[in-house]
Image (cartoon, grey):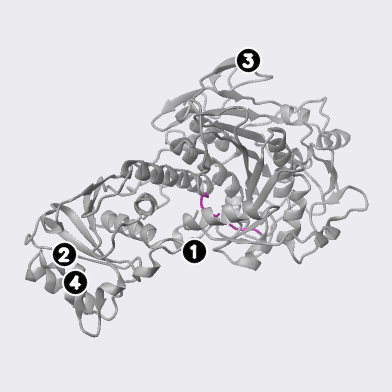
Amino acid sequence: MRRTCGIHSISAAIRANFKTTTTTTSTTSRSSACAFSSTHHASFLSRSTRGKLCTSSTFKRTHTTFVSSTPSTAASNSRSLLSRARGTSRTSVRAMGVNDEFSDKDLFSLPEPPAVKCSAADAKDWAGDVLFVGLTEDSYDAEAKSLSAEAKKVLDGFGAGVMATVMEILSDEEFKLKPGTSKLFSTCGVCSAKNICIVGLGKIDETAKKWGKSTWQVLGATMKSVSKENKSKTAALVTPGVASPVVEDIGNGLFLGAYESTRFKSKQKSNGALSSLELLGCSVDGLDDKIAGAFALAKGQTMARYLVEAPPNVGSPKHLAECAAMIQKTFPDVFELTVLGRKECEDMGMGCYLSVGEAADTESQFIHLKYKGPGWTESSPKIGFVGKGVTFDSGGYNIKAGAGSMIEMMKFDMGGAGAVLGSAFAVGGIKPANVEVNFITAACENMINGHGLRPGDVITASNGKTVEVNNTDAEGRLTLCDAIIYAGKQKCDTIVDIATLTGACIVALGMGIGGIYANTDELAADLTDSAATHGEKLWRMPLEEDYMEYLKSPVADMKNTGIRWGGSITAALYLKEFVPEKTSWAHIDMAGPVWGEKNGGA
């Protein structure tokens, strides 16, 4: 990644249909295979084999092909030829994954969501730890110091003491009923609820906001934060004057709210003990299915956070492969997993991808999770979701150095892979029907040694195109081009790639907005609408064909970077060259949104 930071949370789960298939694949490995054992919601390498290579040459695994291989002396791709020409061909690769000091931790374990149900009970009769009263700005007239009829009706039921406290809170000029504001007080036993919390919903006509987080997502996150701070286990919500809250967004906020990255701390913190939420005075059709879908999506987003925030000595290419294996083990009826090692990628001619990981001690892992939904047939729509998986980016010989290089943050340069694997986890939980989704990431590290990719090298992609490397820190597009070609070979009708690709996109759009490029208006609209629905910000960028001039090379088919200006556009144009004809394609540059210190990281 060139001067990159960045993640855009997981995009909306893909809609489609599905058939349950269970097969057992027998595979003879060219070298060795990793043994797995299952845990709650995850499977990892068993403690006896974690970080080691098994000696067995043949293994069986439901829906899984797992290949780990050493470099071939008969390799055909351009990087192997270069390496042998230098007389430095390696004979072994050291696989790294979770370090020994973290091998006793379940790094993929997800928190349990609260149970959510509707109740016809009056708010005054509800008994539990905290009752949330959601009020819009329209509920309180500051000049008249009066409540709307709906709010007054609900709060009057608690008696004069509670009403007086609420009016005192609302009359405080520093407290506004904006989304995310809250004020909790004890009822001192005058009613069944131990505490009441006034939460702001903003203006009633903005509760359906479609740019950024919705009012209901913010509300869910606020309730989670308040409950966590006060160690509340049971909660209820009443929203006077609002006919029907958006329960999917509330569920999303409840799961993701008050998130803290604590997995690598010696003293663990709970992500919240809230066990139940009752929605009072409302009825929601299909509540259980809506909440289940919301939690499935939120679990996928959390898995993406886990992967992006992991330190680089843990979040290696092997760690991403372990996550993919966990997903396949969690949803074995709908996922097949193939992980290709170096030899297999060499045989497929992936010279661009393999060149990036040439100098790393960690073995590159090409990961392919295939989802087949209920009702799947060969004629079902096929989607390719490709994520950049550079687990640490030193910049290579164009090393990241000096103030502002962000080299210490380059663990998040696999944010695209995190988004892809997080989406796979979400899709496994939602189970859209009659669709095939190919989740693909070409995982590797961009490091430096005598074997490494050099500025000026000419390498060959798996479709035969040659690329002059004029910047080794523009490595992400080299991994993505071979992954996109691979997705095309899976006969995908639509391919979407997502990556922390360019600092230029941050210059254009800032830290909070992802750039989207697409070769069809329909796909661009689908993705931007999906992002808006789920509280994410995407802005369409131009695929300016005239800028291809800057990618021309005198010695190869093209260069991997253009001029300084319009760098995000030329990066997208580079990728477009590897998209199969008649394929609908989009590229999301998530360099800005991948990381936010204000929100605690990933």
Pick whichever of labels 1 and 3 is earlier in the sequence.
3
The answer to whether the residues at label 1 and label 3 have Cβ atoms under 8 Å apart is no
Look at the numbered disc 3 and give the secondary structure of its residue.
Answer: loop
Q: Is residue 9 magenta?
A: yes
Marks 4 and 2 sit apart, C-alpha to C-alpha, by 9 Å
Q: Position of residue 281 (x, y in %)?
A: 20, 55
Q: Residue at x 64, y 25 (%)?
A: 67
Amino acid on which the number 3 mark rests in the picture: Ser
Look at the numbered disc 2 and give the secondary structure of its residue.
Answer: helix
Nearer the camera: disc 3 or disc 4: 4
Pick whichever of labels 4 and 1 is earlier in the sequence.
4
Look at the numbered disc 1 and give the secondary structure of its residue.
Answer: loop
Q: Quadrant of residue 514?
A: bottom right
Classify residue 130 as left or right of residue 266. Answer: left
Determine which residue is flagged by label 2.
Answer: 154
Residue 57, numbered circle: 3
Residue 526 vs 348, above or below: the answer is: below
Viewer-nearest residue: 453 or 26: 26
Amino acid on which the number 4 mark rests in the picture: Ala
Marks 4 and 1 sit apart, C-alpha to C-alpha, by 31 Å
Q: Position of residue 425 (x, y in %)?
A: 48, 38
Q: From which residue to which does the magenta span run?
A: 4-11
Look at the numbered disc 4 and give the secondary structure of its residue.
Answer: helix
Viewer-nearest residue: 499 or 214: 214
Pick whichever of labels 3 and 4 is earlier in the sequence.
3
Determine which residue is flagged by label 4.
Answer: 149
Pick whichever of labels 3 and 2 is earlier in the sequence.
3
Nearer the camera: disc 4 or disc 1: 4
Marks 3 and 4 sit apart, C-alpha to C-alpha, by 74 Å
Determine which residue is flagged by label 1.
Answer: 211
